[in-house]
Image: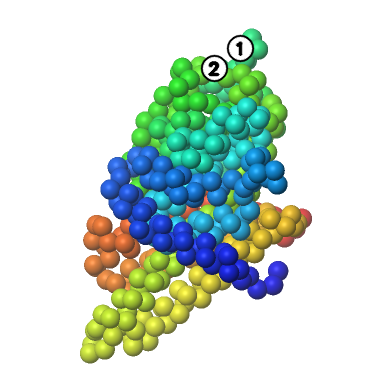
Amino acid sequence: MGEFRLTGQQREFVTWVREVGAERLRPLAEAGPAGKVNRELIKAMGERGLLSRLFARGSDGAAYTDAAAIDLCLLREALAQESTEAETALALQGLGSYPVLQSGSQHQVDRWIPTVAAGEAVAAFALTEPNAGSDAAALELAAEPDASRWRLRGEKIWISNAPEADFYTVFARTTPDAGARGVSAFLVPADRPGLSGEHLDMVSPHPIGRLVFDGVPVGQEDLLGEPDRGFRVAMRTLDLFRPSVGAFAVGMAQAALDAAVAHAGTREAFGAPLKELQSVSHSLAEMATRIEASRLLVYSAAAGYDAGDGGLASRAAMAKLMATETAQFVVDSAIQIHGARALRRGHRLEHLYREVRAPRIYEGASEVQRSIIARELYR
């Protein structure tokens, strides 16, 4: 892939997203309930057409299709620079609803995708379990046969938007001892009997919870795709979203670098601005270089996804690994340049410090990404 450059239309889109993020979404995010779903924020994103950008339209103007990975990355990076809460809320809407879009029936798509795009329904992606994190194929949530239906028994944990979502994409074991081949995907509305949950108090400020399934009834009409093929449904969604997690990380890193550059240019120490100290200027240079390298990896992977290129697993893994590790480094370095002021509750960098840790774990931890890259070297 040659040098990635934004088109004029893409630059205008990024500028518009950042303006909406700063002027409308950030105030709603800051005023919202900590650790809970911010429905007012989600509704505002729907009203301004941001959520509908998750779902491209077909040539007939009616059928929903996958958004381009490039567009998804542009959207997530731009939002992350202004409001991580808005970015995360948008990403979770996509993560929870893409299995419906990609593998659901026409009835399921018509029922849920327009309401997600409008910001009227909250989606969630329920894959992780207490004993099935990085090894997602080891999940144990049982889909027990019950006449022509199933009943879900078990629990999910670390589920974003739980327990407040309006529907969940749930991955359950329909065939015991079959690994990834025995998993099915279901669309489970939140009002199903036997479904309950609780909030979890986490470092990151977005909503995360635990779900308990006590004989929750599901049928053929709730399946997403074919029985025992649900792991493919999960991986198809994660393959699309993995580069855009990198875009989220790049956006956070860029926000931290911008703050550090501004601070180093105005704050004086030892009779001169901080930027005149070689230790500070070299740190800023290192931060900027790593961000640019991460950005290019992210958009290379996204462009490859859109073009249907081969070798996407490795490129997407590289993009997520590089970008999330870089974001951690950049935010930490920016705090070091600011000093104690950046650790005060409410400071932008203090907020970013809490946000930046989780992406190195979710949707495939850094160690998993390294394993994918290494495996692909020998394929």
Pick the front one: 188 or 363: 188
Q: CA distance from mark 2 to mark 1?
A: 9 Å
- Give, as a three-letter code, the residue at label 1: Asp
User: Residue 185, image x and y in percent?
Assistant: 61, 30
The color scheme shown is: rainbow
User: Residue 340, image x and y in percent?
Assistant: 24, 68
At horizontal 56% and vertical 29% (from top left) the residue drawn is: 111
At horizontal 40% and vertical 66% (from top left) the residue drawn is: 255
Is residue 307 in view? Answer: yes
Mark 1 is surrounded, within 10 Å at the Cα level, by few (under 14), some (14 to 19) or many (20 or more) other residues, namely: few
At horizontal 31% and vertical 53% (from top left) the residue drawn is: 27
Pick the front one: 133 or 205: 205
**Which structural element holds mark 1?**
strand
At horizontal 39% and vertical 83% (from top left) the residue drawn is: 281
Residue 113, picture quadrant: top right
Pick the front one: 151 or 31: 31
User: For the view shown, which residue lies furthest in the top direction?
Assistant: 147
Residue 338 is left or right of residue 19, and the answer is: left
Is residue 369 in view? Answer: no
| Label 2 vs label 1, nearer the camera | 2
- Give, as a three-letter code, the residue at label 2: Pro
Above-or-below relation of 276 to 107: below
First in sequence, mark 2 or 1: give its number.
1
Residue 327 is left or right of residue 342, and the answer is: right
User: For the view shown, which residue lies furthest in the bottom direction?
Assistant: 271
Residue corresponding to mark 2: 217
Q: Are marks 2 and 1 in contact (CB under 8 Å)?
A: yes
User: Residue 114, image x and y in percent?
Assistant: 54, 37
Residue corresponding to mark 1: 146
Above-or-below relation of 221 to 356: above
